[in-house]
């Protein structure tokens, strides 16, 4: 058993949260920066909760948006649909986050190419979502690259558990929301753990504005886990991320953290800050 006296950790209710801090996990790099500390720090029955982006980047799930030419549909979805209709009309009516509304009203020109990427890779159902379409991450990739959701997160979680070699649960999550209505869970994201109806795109997002927001979405798990537990662990991990000064949840927070425009971000700049791609969550024993 590891003595936590000299290990960075915080207490969240009945749980201890131990961050795993790394540099920037680069394309095609393995996940040893997460796995090796976990081997030392984890105990049986712990949860290892990992953000989806480092998994995606390690899998080289990157797309260069500068290579996409926006179609008329992409331009319409960016300017008329997202910026004006959602930024000034539907967003305020439906009570979406004030931060999201502000960001929609100042969408940069590059968003048109981004919409084209969503259209081509995921279709209109996801491109209609005014922001955070299909779980694509714009804020943790260099230059004009974005990262897609990881390939087969459930298998990745199982492989990581096997490598750690302890009786633990590995969970891969995305900050995009899961919602609940009439006792049923759903998300706009293309994938989620069993028990959450996924791949609803814009329609899940719109319905979600009229439902209860349950927080971050578990994408894949090494075990068969009930949705409530998966959501609880995902949100404990997200609470910790929100406490960090280096959190880059949106493209608009990149400049504040790295001091550079989004399309000028380099791997070196990303590697210059401390990343927390995963946390260990341990229930406090009575």
Image (tube, rainbow, N blue to C red):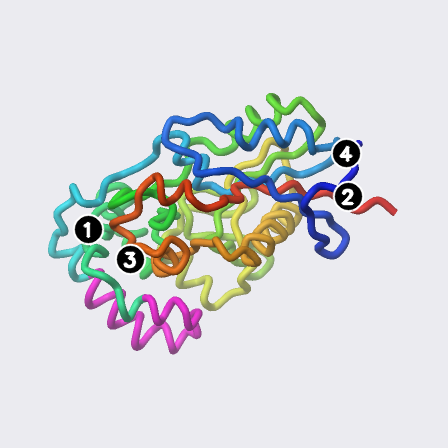
Mark 3 vs mark 4: give the one in front: 4
Q: Which residue is mark 4?
A: 2
Give above or below for 269 relative to 36: below
**Which residue sits at x=76%, y=45%?**
283
What numbered label is drawn on residue 113?
Answer: 1
Instruction: Report the residue marked by disc 3.
Output: 128
Q: Main secondary structure of the magenta part?
A: helix
Measured Cα–Cα span from mark 4 to mark 2: 9 Å
Residue 140 image position (x, y, % from top left): 38, 46
| Residue 259 image-quadrant placement | bottom left
Helix, strand or loop at disc 1?
helix
Do the numbered discs 4 and 2 sit on residues whose CB atoms are within 8 Å?
no
Taking the image as shown, residue 260 lies to the left or right of residue 80, namely right
Residue marked by disc 2: 5
Q: Reading the chain from its start, which is encountered first: label 1 or label 3?
A: 1
Image spot of residue 209 (x, y percent): 45, 66
Q: Measure the alpha-carbon separation of dots 3 and 2.
A: 49 Å
- What is the span of residues highlighted in magenta in the rendered image? 77-103
* Rendered view: 280 above or below 177: above
């Amino acid at each position: 058993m590891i003595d936590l006296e000299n290990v960075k950790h915080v207490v969240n209710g009945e749980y201890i949260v131990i961050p795993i801090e790394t540099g920037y996990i680069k394309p095609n790099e393995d996940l040893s920066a997460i796995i090796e500390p976990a081997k030392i720090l984890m105990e049986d029955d712990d949860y290892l909760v990992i953000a989806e982006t480092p998994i995606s980047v390690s899998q080289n799930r990157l797309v260069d948006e500068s290579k996409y030419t926006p179609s008329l549909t992409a331009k319409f979805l960016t300017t008329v649909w997202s910026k004006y209709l959602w930024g000034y009309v539907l967003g305020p009516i439906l009570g979406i986050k004030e931060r999201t509304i502000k960001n929609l009203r100042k969408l940069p020109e590059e968003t048109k190419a981004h919409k084209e990427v969503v259209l081509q890779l995921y279709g209109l159902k996801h491109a209609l979502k005014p922001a955070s379409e299909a779980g694509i991450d714009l804020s943790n990739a260099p230059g004009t690259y974005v990262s897609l959701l990881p390939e087969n997160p459930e298998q990745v979680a199982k492989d990581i558990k096997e490598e750690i070699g302890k009786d633990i649960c590995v969970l891969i999550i995305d900050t995009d929301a899961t919602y609940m209505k009439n006792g049923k869970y759903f998300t706009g994201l293309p994938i989620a753990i069993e028990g959450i109806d996924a791949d609803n795109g814009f329609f899940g997002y719109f319905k979600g504005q009229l439902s209860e927001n349950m927080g971050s979405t578990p994408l894949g798990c090494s075990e068969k886990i009930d949705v409530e537990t998966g959501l609880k662990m995902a949100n404990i991990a997200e609470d910790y991320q929100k406490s960090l000064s280096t959190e880059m949840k949106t493209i608009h927070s990149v400049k504040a953290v790295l001091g550079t425009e989004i399309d000028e971000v380099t791997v070196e700049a990303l590697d210059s800050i401390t990343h927390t791609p995963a946390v260990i969550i341990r229930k406090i024993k009575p």
